[in-house]
Amino acid sequence: MHRTSLRRFALVAVIALGGLSLVTAPRPAEGAPLCRLALVLALDVSASVDETEYDLLRRGTAAALDSPQVREAIKALGGVYLSVFEWSGRSKQRIIVPWVALENGQAIAGAAGQIAVHPRSTSEYPTALGAALGYAHGLLGDGPALCERQVVDMAGDGENNHGFGPGSAYRAFDYRAITVNGLVVGDPNGEVATYYAEEVLNGPDSFLEVARGYEDFEETMRRKLLREIGVLSLSALE
């Protein structure tokens, strides 16, 4: 199947599975340097996340993105394209940050500020990981062109319990060139981490980070962003 046909199939499938809000990002001008990294942050806001935890998730993501270490890593890479959305039920995804080029401190601070003040879209729906992966695929398809790497950062605290699962998403959408990493929160028995490792992670360079709880979310997200940007050595993540 040709790439154009795959993309058309993916968009139709997402719409059929619950709707898709397309966000158009500026495309690089002809002759412009390739985008080094297109990164999608997907944040779980399902019913298992209470209001205190949501506040820690939202503020932790913003603080991690705007931390000095992450700022320097983005600068060293030459910039990153970023989009952020929150997800819960099968048709419950909402954009927090449309595609934006993080090329300087002002752009990074602006994106972090959007995340920090964003009102929660919903709190009543279950965990639809497969639909979230479908939505992320559509978002990348409508994002910046010619990126060397496309990465989806799935953050959550539970297994799929609504609609089709990650395996079905990977069969329906072309994720062969997309890396999916995981951030699992509050998993004392390791069951959710095992599920993410076996069902959610995608790509040979994918990895999983585990936060002890939402109070540890900021530090875990900071460490994860540094690994995804891929400029600093692992020793710098300590």
Image (tube, rainbow, N blue to C red):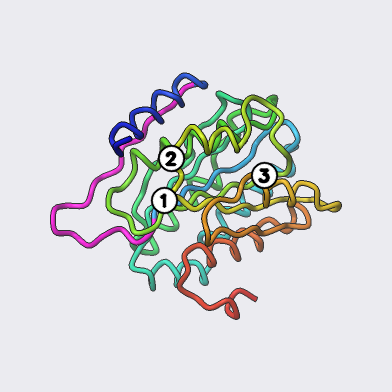
Please identify the quadrant where the N terminus is shown: top left
Query: Residue 217's x, y, as percent?
Result: 68, 56
Outermost residue toward the left in this view: 30
- Measured Cα–Cα span from mark 1 to mark 2: 8 Å
Q: Which residue is mark 1?
A: 177
Q: Which residue is mark 2?
A: 174
User: Which of the two marks, 2 or 3, is nearer to us in this view?
Assistant: 2
Q: How many marks?
A: 3
For the record, the magenta segment spans 19-37
Callout 2 environment at 10 Å: few (<14), some (14 to 19), or many (20+)?
some
Q: Residue at x 75, y 55 (%)?
A: 215
Labelled disc at residue 193: none
Query: Residue 23's x, y, as percent?
Result: 36, 35
Residue 36 part of the magenta segment: yes
- Amino acid carrying label 2: it is Asp
User: Which of the two marks, 3 or 1, is nearer to us in this view?
Assistant: 1
Closer to the camera in the image, 168 or 75? 168
Query: Residue 105's x, y, as percent?
Result: 39, 64
Closer to the camera in the image, 18 or 54? 18
Q: Residue at x 52, y 35 (%)?
A: 171
Q: Dot 3: what SS?
A: strand
Q: Which residue is mark 3?
A: 156
Mark 3 / mark 1, whichever is N-terminal = 3
Q: Residue at x 41, y 51 (%)?
A: 177
Magenta span: chief secondary structure: loop
